[in-house]
Image (cartoon, coloured by chain):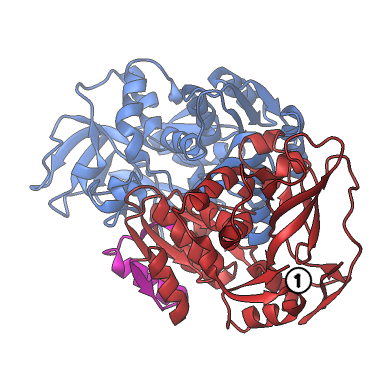
Chain colours: A blue, B red
Amino acid sequence: MKGAVLYGPYDVRFEERADPAIVEPTDAIIRLSASCICGSDLWPYRGANPVKKPSPMGHEYCGIVEEVGRDVRTVKKGQFVIGSFFASDNSCPHCRHGYQTSCMQKTPVVGAQAPWLRVPLADGTLVATRDVPPASLIPNLLAVSDVLGTGWFAADAANVTKGSTVAVVGDGAVGLLAILSAKCMGAERIIAMSRHEARQRLAREYGATDVVTERGEEGAARIKELTKGVGADSVLECVGTQESMWQAIHATRPGGYVSYVGVPHGVQLDGAKLFYTHVHLHGGPAPVRRYLPDLIELVLDGTIEPGKVFDLTLPLDQVAEGYKAMDERRAIKTLLTT
Amino acid sequence: MKGAVLYGPYDVRFEERADPAIVEPTDAIIRLSASCICGSDLWPYRGANPVKKPSPMGHEYCGIVEEVGRDVRTVKKGQFVIGSFFASDNSCPHCRHGYQTSCMQKTPVVGAQAPWLRVPLADGTLVATRDVPPASLIPNLLAVSDVLGTGWFAADAANVTKGSTVAVVGDGAVGLLAILSAKCMGAERIIAMSRHEARQRLAREYGATDVVTERGEEGAARIKELTKGVGADSVLECVGTQESMWQAIHATRPGGYVSYVGVPHGVQLDGAKLFYTHVHLHGGPAPVRRYLPDLIELVLDGTIEPGKVFDLTLPLDQVAEGYKAMDERRAIKTLLTT
């Protein structure tokens, strides 16, 4: 088969790779219904993370089970399944606490920008739907696999509840779906921080009540102003830079909650400064597996349409253009048809 | 009157200071029943915080109201009161959320190592008991003012609940009372990290089930070992150094809770490292005012004896020796009779 491989900064190639095969008896092979490019793929694409060897790309996926290893019990050939970007056994103590991305057996799932994918620990990782869903729902279901799950974790980790005042730092696909998540959790006021018109529109469609264009300390000051000097109850940091992190912390009221879900790049937190802000801080790789069953339901019953973040659809062989469009912010998120 | 004044590193003097007087109509003047020295007083005493000018010391207090300003409504002359180290109005949005140490009107209370003390914002800051308590209860009630309130916040901020596995980093008075607090909140297992025999004894008396003498990464590894490789649900960081902070973070299970209540000195948190630990982090200056009513009750009804942390009692004029004994770890905490 052919799939996406990153060779170095700005160098994604669509090229021949070995067909995935069962390696462990707990593996499954999936025929992907669609694939996509993640905001986090842009870090190595832009050279922020070094690429030591040619790397198969992609970790968001849904599709039809083609084959399972002999120890797989809960999914079977022909079923439609969705999984998360880390394979997990869903039974170790960390998984039982809901932190499947810290599973004691966790294994990254890689190479999903391709027609087929090997998923380790299939029983713990994959969630099957009752029926094979219609093609029209594929973008929404694919989004559940990472970007919605991550936005949902951002809202959950920042303790968003009914009536909360929420601010979201970052207008990428995760930030936009964090807004949708906060709305679903009953937030009363949702302040989107964005300078990009198309993204502001989707933010409002997903539930944002205000838009703030200022950034950094100015952005934080604007949030304080909008909340009568108090600060937001919950601020969802969906970027991962030093500026965005402090913007989030300083926009939060004392005793409020800051979540962070993008891998921090160059972020240093001064302990004493953080101390006096009195915020709660929680984040990490989103344990999407925890939320999969509920989020799949919300998509299937039509409550949410997270797939709207895909504003560019390309055939898989044009994956390089998909990266370029996201890097240049011409696209929020690229769907790849397989 | 005479009180304690810090002039520079290791230079505490007992000398004449102006008698406190009502400055604002919301002030109260208290005749102190006793005073004491805080672990945080050792930072400037040791030169870790610069002393720019001679500074009246002490911020833990309880005593009898001598005089109140004309706007004070809830406490009156002759009542026994306890307050916190930050004066707060107890009515602003931050106070209503329970973060009185971030009160929009907050003012530090200073100079409590003396016979009399001015307390600003008396209505918001002070809690009066129904009767004047017997002298035997004074050490327990004085401890509520800061050191117990801070230990209690450490346990609360780290989400200690019935059945929790808890570790406490730091065997100072705050750490020891964090153990007592965790016990009160129903923790099943409480691991004290201490190398000091007398402190280990009090830790066990207060509810510690295990003692770990290793520190830093070794200490964290030992906690992991004791918890079957999982880590503690809640780790209470009661020191404030880089080593103790990472010891706490690495001793916590993914999804677990780290609280930190000592002012961090030289603590830098790498965002990416923190991200992958998956911990919740919360701390800051303990909002003792939030807990005062309940903690006073627990002392008055004999449930807890936080005053056991005072293992040295000196008359106020020997305050310098009180500092010295704590600095040299000969005393856990010094009570000063006024």
The answer to which of B178 and A74 lies nearer the viewer is B178
Which quarter of the rendered picture does the C terminus of chain A lie within?
top left
Q: Is residue A278 visible?
A: yes
Three-letter code, disc 1: Asn
x, y percent for residue A107: 30, 54
- Magenta region, residue range: B209-234
Residue at x 47%, y 25% (from the top left corner) = A185
Residue A266 sits in quarter: bottom right
Residue B222 on the magenta span: yes
Asked whether, in this view, residue A268 is left or right of residue A151, the answer is: right
x, y percent for residue A322: 50, 37
Q: Secondary structure at mark 1?
A: loop
Residue A3 sits in quarter: top left
Asked whether, in this view, residue A325 is left or right of residue A89, the answer is: right
Residue at x 49%, y 38% (from the top left corner) = A154
The answer to which of A103 and A98 lies nearer the viewer is A98
> Which residue is the extreme one toward the top?
A302
Residue at x 28%, y 57% (from the top left corner) = A104
The answer to which of A81 and B160 lies nearer the viewer is B160
Residue A144 on the magenta span: no
Asked whether, in this view, residue B127 is left or right of residue B148, the answer is: right
> Which residue is the extreme one toward the left?
A70
Which quarter of the rendered picture does the N terminus of chain A lie within?
top left
**Which chain does the numbered disc 1 sit on?**
B
Q: Which residue is mark 1?
A: B49
